[in-house]
Image (cartoon, rainbow, N blue to C red):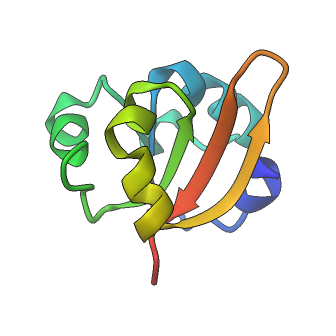
Amino acid sequence: PFVEVAQKIGAADLIMANTRIVHVAVWATAIPMRRFVTEMNENVWGPSLNDIDPRIRWVITEEGDQLWHGRGKWLEKNWVEVASAKGPVTGTVHLYRRPE
């Protein structure tokens, strides 16, 4: 389901994802790596674990990763879950979009 949704992501939208899952997402969707905010982007990632940067419109998180533990319950309550899937080598991965 993520590939179909990727076509709806705006050209300027940022996507927050843990480094464990980001490479799979880039490979499957062909979204450029520069659009993803990961732990490597410390100036945006760290503060976004408390208050997600308004430039981030989408979040991909795998159950059990740092982002899931830090914001998973909050995302479930406050953002819109668009898709979820369990891959052969991943836990359940959730895709959320910021509410309009």
Name the outermost residue toward the bottom.
Answer: 100
Q: Residue at x 45, y 66 (%)?
A: 77
Position in image of residue 59 (x %, y %): 49, 50
Image quadrant assignment for residue 36: top left
Name the outermost residue toward the top.
Answer: 89
Q: Is residue 24 visible?
A: yes
Instruction: Give the left or right position of residue 76, taking residue 53 as reference.
Output: right
- Check the image and report above or below for 97 versus 47: below
- Check the image and report above or below for 46 versus 78: above
Instruction: Give the left or right position of residue 39, taking residue 83 as reference.
Output: left
Q: Residue at x 30, y 23 (%)?
A: 40
Image quadrant assignment for residue 26: top right
- Check the image and report above or below for 3 versus 76: above
Image quarter in which the C terminus is found? bottom left
Q: Nearer the viewer, residue 96 or 22?
A: 96
Q: Is residue 15 visible?
A: no
Q: Residue at x 76, y 35 (%)?
A: 28
Position in image of residue 17 (x %, y %): 47, 37
Image quadrant assignment for residue 34: top left
Position in image of residue 22 (x %, y %): 55, 29
Question: How many numbered callouts?
Answer: 0
Q: Residue at x 53, y 19 (%)?
A: 20
Position in image of residue 55 (x %, y %): 31, 62
Q: Nearer the viewer, residue 73 or 20?
A: 73
